[in-house]
Amino acid sequence: MPNQIQYDVIILGAGAAGLMSAITASKRGRKVLVLEKSNKVGKKILMSGGGRCNFTNEFVDSDNFISQNKHFCKSALNGFSSQDFVNLVDQHAIEYEIRKRNQFFCQGSSKNILDMLLKECDAGGVDIQTHTEINHIRNVVCNENNEVHSFISANRFVLEGTFKLGSNQRYIEYSCKSLIVATGALSVPTLGGSGYGYDIAEQFDLSITEKYAGLVPFVFTDSLKPIFSRLSGVSTLVQVECNGHVFLENMLFTHRGLSGPAMLQISNYWSSDDRLLVNLIPNVDPGKELVRIREQGDKRLIRSYLTEYLPKSLVIELQSMWWPKHSELPINKINPSELINIGYKLNNWIIKPSGTEGFRTAEVTVGGVSTDGINSKTMEVKNQPGLYFVGEVLDVSGQLGGFNFQWAWSSGFAAGRVA
């Protein structure tokens, strides 16, 4: 007979959403246990923002999130706002700064945010246990005759019972009235990401939407790959468009393809076989400009003019692709139609990625547990009282800029205040 360990609330996953759930529930006097399968808590927090943790954004709106139900996130975001989290950071006297795109970053280390969360957990008497992997969950309920039944799945019963959890800790069975699934998703498995939360969802008859890697670099296998490889490390401001979404950010060339904020942002909206429209010189019509300076008798080479806007190494590669025959001709000797054509290509570079780097380097998983079966105010499963899903495991994914952390804080708070 296994040793029974009873808690009011058990949380699976010691990431951002799980820790926020624990803090909030403990402040209500609940006895809380957090179970983490890896060797340490908050790995993704520590790695975020280049080690500085972009913990939220000054302006958070539902438009910053992707979900099959675009309205689902609103209630939780309103219930615990970015300012609410900043207030908590202020209480712990953590120094931060607001960078471009209204992102909040620690001035020191990401560890400051994790330490803050752990201090809040400690103050609430939260128990945290690492190296614990759950291998089965049962929901034990009583019928009208007070007879105990154990259900491996929900089986459409809407009965409040006790969740029994078995794990790799032999001879121990955990039990609780409220179970919060904060297991994260498939992105960056080395930081603790996994698909276990989806298994739990399916066990309790919840559907899973299509999942794919988001906020992830693109890879190329065509003739552009060697060009991008030669440009590896070069960055430039671009406007990128795909499926009606447009971002004005830096693009970074890599050995395998394209990265940087512009590419990470647009990857959330890209599907296989889609093409990207890249404007290399946003807000400038280089074709019109080239014709204008041609009429003024400008004797510079096209590449000399373009280095005012683009890195020289990039201009050299573009020259080889788009105007090799005119590479050594002064601008005033080139036909205006040729200049307009070159300018058009600079504003409308159409490229087709062969794919992305996948979940290995993705910052988020787009898709997940369908929100159809989840209460948007509490994150509780509608047909299974006491079971909650929070954070990235749900079909709610944010854009780059602190939005995914804010969803973790907000959804974790929503569940913790009622679980």
Image: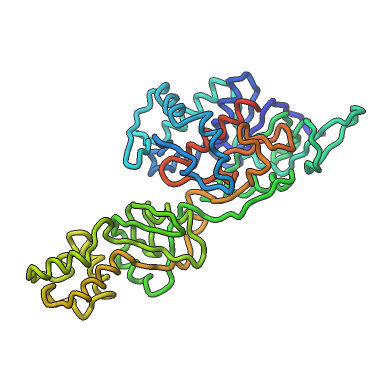
Left or right: residue 280 versus residue 52 is left
| Quarter of the view holding residue 280 | bottom left
Left or right: residue 106 versus residue 169 is left
Residue 187 position within the rendered picture, expressed as x and y whole percent measured from the top left: 53, 50
The quarter of the picture where the N terminus appears is: top right
Residue drawn 33% across and 70% down?
Answer: 227
The quarter of the picture where the C terminus appears is: top right
| Quarter of the view holding residue 351 | bottom left
Asked whether 288 or 383 is in front, the reply is 288
Q: Is residue 41 visible?
A: no
Q: How many marks can you see? A: 0
Residue drawn 65% across and 48% down?
Answer: 198
Asked whether 352 or 127 is in front, the reply is 352
| Quarter of the view holding residue 353 | bottom left
Residue 139 position within the rendered picture, expressed as x and y whole percent measured from the top left: 78, 36
Residue 278 position within the rendered picture, expressed as x and y whole percent measured from the top left: 35, 62
Q: Is residue 290 visible?
A: yes
Left or right: residue 76 versus residue 237 is right
Outermost residue on the top side: it is: 29
Outermost residue on the bottom side: it is: 325
Vertical placement of residue 4 versus 150, above or below: above
Residue drawn 73% across and 33% down?
Answer: 385
Left or right: residue 38 versus residue 296 is right
Residue drawn 33% across and 35% down?
Answer: 98
Residue 313 position within the rendered picture, expressed as x and y whole percent measured from the top left: 23, 65
